Image (tube, helix red, strand yellow):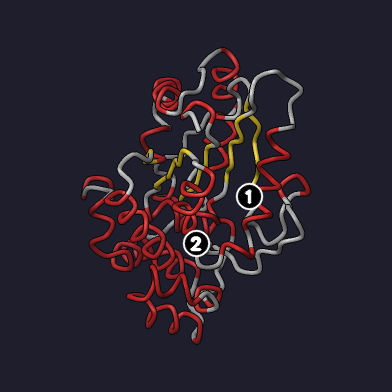
Amino acid sequence: MPAAAAPILVTGSHRSGTTWVGRILASAPSTVYLHEPFHRRPDPDTAGADTRFDCWFTYVCRENEQAYRAAIEDVLARAARAHASNRPTRPIVKDPLAVFSAPWFADRFQTRNVVLVRHPAAFAASLKHKGWTHPFADFLRQPLLMAHHLDPFAGEIMRFTRQAHDVVDQAALLWRLIYSVVLQYQRDFPGWTYVRHEDLVPDPPSAFRTLFAQLDLDYGVDAERAIAAHRRTEVADWRERLTDTEIQRVRIGVGTLADRFYADADW
């Protein structure tokens, strides 16, 4: 498939700006936005072929794709027919819940993958603000995910499944699980696009112009309007949302992995 016609998957952790980025990319001509087909309760437009995603962060790979492939094929095919146009329609699939399945998307659907990174303290502050906890047992229910990616964290995941932990400590572990895999992606798939949320916010027009070019999307007045309508300013609001003790807990919880994405000055 020509690169300029390939679907685009926007993923990363949730609360990393995937919706923001996906919506702005979908302002490009001949694109259509698809919202979280891996969600346990998907929108009607992104629910496909009678398939249920029963776990948060469902992991799909060649070994289990028979249970999911038809659903995603159906979603992408309907998206391609969404616009009455002589030009092919490029789906922009926004789904942080597909982060562990991103290699499968690229393999099976030739997606251009965009992986967003967000500061671990910002991620924790956002989850705290939303009150969003995570059912870590969903990872243990997926033996292929554990075997292929998360086995080094099995003991911690079991502990968080058996004992209650507050949202800040949950966020630190969840960030480490997700971005340990993203770090491996950077080694295995250097051709993907990796973007820190904090690098987009200060000058969105310049940052998105570069991103559009990398993805063979036309950057024009519609993109400028979308950026203006959804401008963000909350790069470091986590310093107000988290206590000093909570920030320290996050930093300890994510460990040295954070150093691969952020410098000491970013804390």
Nearest the eye: 186 or 122: 186
Question: Where residue 228 sits: x, y (%)?
Answer: 56, 22
Quadrant in the rendering for residue 84: top right
Number of residues whose C-alpha sits closer than 10 Å to that of mark 2, classed few (under 14), some (14–19) or many (20 or more): many
Nearest the eye: 27 or 66: 66
Question: Where residue 111 sits: x, y (%)?
Answer: 50, 41
Q: Name the residue furthest top.
A: 221
Asked which secondary structure carries label 2, the reply is loop
Quadrant in the rendering for residue 28: top right
Q: Amino acid at mark 2?
A: Cys
Residue 76 visible at all: yes
Check disc 1 and report the residue beneath it.
36
Check disc 2 and report the residue beneath it.
61
> Looking at the rendered structure, which numbered label has been put on residue 234?
none
> What's the residue at 74%, 26% (across, down)?
83
> What's the residue at 52%, 64% (across, down)?
59
> What's the residue at 49%, 61% (across, down)?
61
Nearest the eye: 221 or 127: 221
Question: Where residue 178 sits: x, y (%)?
Answer: 41, 60
Asked which secondary structure carries label 1, the reply is loop
Which is nearer the N-term, disc 2 or disc 1? 1
In the image, is residue 153 above or below residue 176? below
Q: Are marks 2 and 1 in contact (CB under 8 Å)?
A: no
What separation in Å lies between label 2 and label 1 (alpha carbons)?
18 Å
Question: Where residue 5 sits: x, y (%)?
Answer: 54, 28
In the image, is residue 59 above or below residue 158? above
Horizontal placement of 196 versus 31: left or right?
A: left
Q: Amino acid at mark 1?
A: Glu
